[in-house]
Amino acid sequence: MKKLLQLSFLLIAPTLIYAQNYISYNHTITVANGKSVSVSNRGVFHIWVNSWAIEENKQYKSFVRFSRDKPYLDGATTRWEAAIYSIKKRNDGSVEYWTKNHGQTVLYLLDMNAVKRNMTEVRYSNNKVVKKTIYYLV
């Protein structure tokens, strides 16, 4: 009976499809509270983009996770995540990850072809950009 339970758990366990980790040591805020600004900050951000599949019901879950100072799953005290509802690869090779977070639509745009590789976070409220942050990746 014990082996049967273990086997059934393995059949419905999530399968990792995609996971990528990025680190940013500095970032620039270009829009805050809907107004143009130019504020550069230093600090470590760990960014993790992953997708999971649950084989039993063909359900897919994707997330963007951020944490400060430590990796997300290693006990970082400041961390946040958002479920991805749409992923789109652009013609220029960059990738759009669309999420909803605290009532706002959030675009995470990953550009690995830029001179300075980056992930741009754009927060929308009522179809207006309220915050834009560019995380420069190492």
Image (cartoon, rainbow, N blue to C red):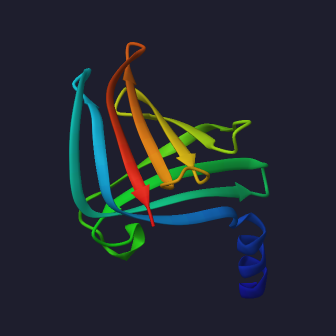
* Residue 30 image point, x, y percent: 29, 34
Q: Judge by depth and name the residue closer to the eye, 77 or 3.
A: 77
* Residue 60 image point, x, y percent: 69, 48
Horizontal placement of 63 versus 45: left or right? right
Quarter of the C terminus within the rendering: bottom left
> Is residue 108 placed above or below 66 in the rendered structure?
above
Q: Judge by depth and name the residue closer to the eye, 13 or 44.
A: 44
Residue depicted at 55% across the width and 50% down the height: 114
Residue depicted at 59% across the width and 58% down the height: 50
Residue depicted at 69% across the width and 45% down the height: 93
Quadrant in the rendering for residue 87 = top right
Q: Judge by depth and name the residue closer to the eye, 123 or 92.
A: 92
* Residue 65 image point, x, y percent: 44, 55
Quarter of the N terminus within the rendering: bottom right
Horizontal placement of 44 versus 10: left or right? left
Residue depicted at 60% across the width and 50% down the height: 62
Horizontal placement of 115 versus 87: left or right? left
> Is residue 48 placed above or below 101 in the rendered structure?
below
